[in-house]
Image (tube, rainbow, N blue to C red):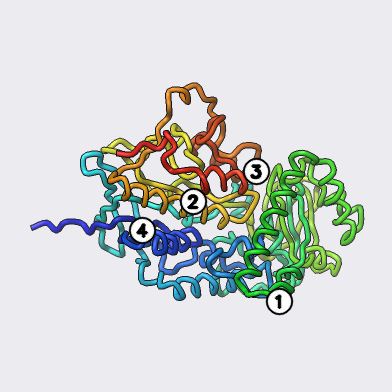
Amino acid sequence: MSVSPEHLDVVVVGAGISGISAAYHLQTMCPDREFAILEGRSALGGTWDLFRYPGVRSDSDMHTLGFKFKPWSNPKAIADGPSILDYLNETVDEFGIREKIRFDHRISNASWSWIDRRWTLTVDHGADTFEITANFVFMCTGYYSYRGGFTPEFAGADAFGGQMIHPQEWPEDLDYAGKRVAVIGSGATAVTLVPAMTDRAEHVTMVQRTPTWVVSAPSQDPIANALRKVLPNGLAFELTRQKNRRFGEYVYRQTRTNPDRVRRRLLSELAKHLPQEQIDAHFTPSYNPWDQRVCLVPDADLFEAIKARKADVVTDTIQRFTETGIQLDSGTHVDADIIVTATGLNLVTIGEMDLDIDGEKIDFSELWTYKGLGYSEIPNLISVFGYINASWTLRADLIVEYGCRLLNHMRNTGTDTATPRLRPSDLDMPRRPFIDDFPAGYMQRMMPMLPKQGDRAPWLNTQSVSEDMKLIGKETVDDGVMVFG
């Protein structure tokens, strides 16, 4: 005799920042809905549990990366990974979310039935595979693969006699004391690793093909710390959050409207830390700030390591690996006992699971994004994809709040499906990339897989907190495009 699958009102996929935010908002805004968080790994935290390399930290301030319902009170605004993971664990315990998480539950397939008007999720848990059905799904899986990072093919990689490591698979027992380390890359991970490893390594060399914009900021926010002394913690946190959000948006707008001015400002800041010849050679990109992500270094730690001659930067192209390091096209050889390939992530859609509607597999590249959180003709599903130019959580909160308002509207109107559907006037829209004006390689590798955005609301992925606060946060869910049934 077959047993009917367990049924839930809502399934949240993923127990990282987005999934925890979803759980809090479901409990608060939709207390009548039965839900569970299905987490494929054995621990919560997502990014902050997965990455364990030296120095791992946020590159956003914790007043915007933290939850608005759980004030960040640590004096350090730029926090290390273990502190962030502690904060996430405190949050799930404080709000009774941990009991909602089912660990080691990996979804391999999600299938929507228009007859049953529900999702059927195929779940792998250890040696068992079973099904769970749900009326609605919140996808909170992030945008990169947990199965491994991106490493280009390097000529002669097999010849290298030392250890080659990707930051996503950092060995817990790696001993780099007294070793020469080469870090390949120039992004956020590379600029974090280099100063962090100088505490024990003999020397660390950052090998980059081209420079990245790098800016120093204090690890502590003096205004936030002062406000906490005179105001209730929650109010101090909210004021700091709004200050940082608005300042971040202002800076980003300036990079779009006055790029030469921002470029001059960043170069003048670099001149406070490094000699001009190093700035010209290694820290002056050919592109404008925020054409690719700007890297943050707290308290100028990267520049301090370079000045102390514990680290250096080489800007060149790699010809091949050798037994003892990296041969560059210029003829320079970088000696290394350990090579770290901080070369990026493998980006994915919808947590590497398959989705279908009535047995027809969904090709996301053929769909339109609805407000950056849903997909044309995909019912009862929202998906969290954060900002590239601001803290992830700012958008995650907006999206899951919207999802809860959508659920409540469906309850109040007696409907059980909600599907974004193009209007006749939308059929002539140009097909624009999911994220415009951001040529970073890791993102461009993903663009062909992602849905497209149009040239009008609500078929937009704005990447702007202020615009999203209007598009997602304030507009009614019954906008004439979301079709209820």
Which residue occupies 44% across, 32% down?
A: 366
Which image quarter holds the C terminus? top left
Q: Position of residue 464 (x, y in %)?
A: 62, 45
Per the image, the residue denoted by label 4 is: 106
Cα–Cα gap, marks 1 and 3: 43 Å
Q: Residue at x 65, y 39 (%)?
A: 439
Real-space CA distance between mark 2 and mark 1, rounded to the nearest whole angstrom: 33 Å
Tell me, for residue 230, which label it has, or none.
1
Q: Earlier in the sequence, mark 1 or mark 3?
A: 1
Going from the N terminus, do you reach mark 3 or mark 4 first? 4
| Residue 270: quarter of image | bottom right
**Residue under pointer 2:** 399
From mark 3 to mark 4, how far is it between C-alphas? 30 Å
Mark 1 element type: helix
Foreground tag (2 vs 1)? 1
Residue placed under numbered mark 3 in the picture: 440
Q: Residues within 10 Å of mark 4 (few under 14, many from 20)?
A: many
x and y percentages locating residue 122 in the rendered image:
28, 53
Q: Residues within 10 Å of mark 3 (few under 14, many from 20)?
A: few
Q: Earlier in the sequence, mark 2 or mark 1?
A: 1
Please give left or right for residue 161 compared with residue 304 in the image: left
- For the question of whether residue 456 can be seen, the reply is yes
Which residue does the image show at 29% across and 50% down from the upper left? 135
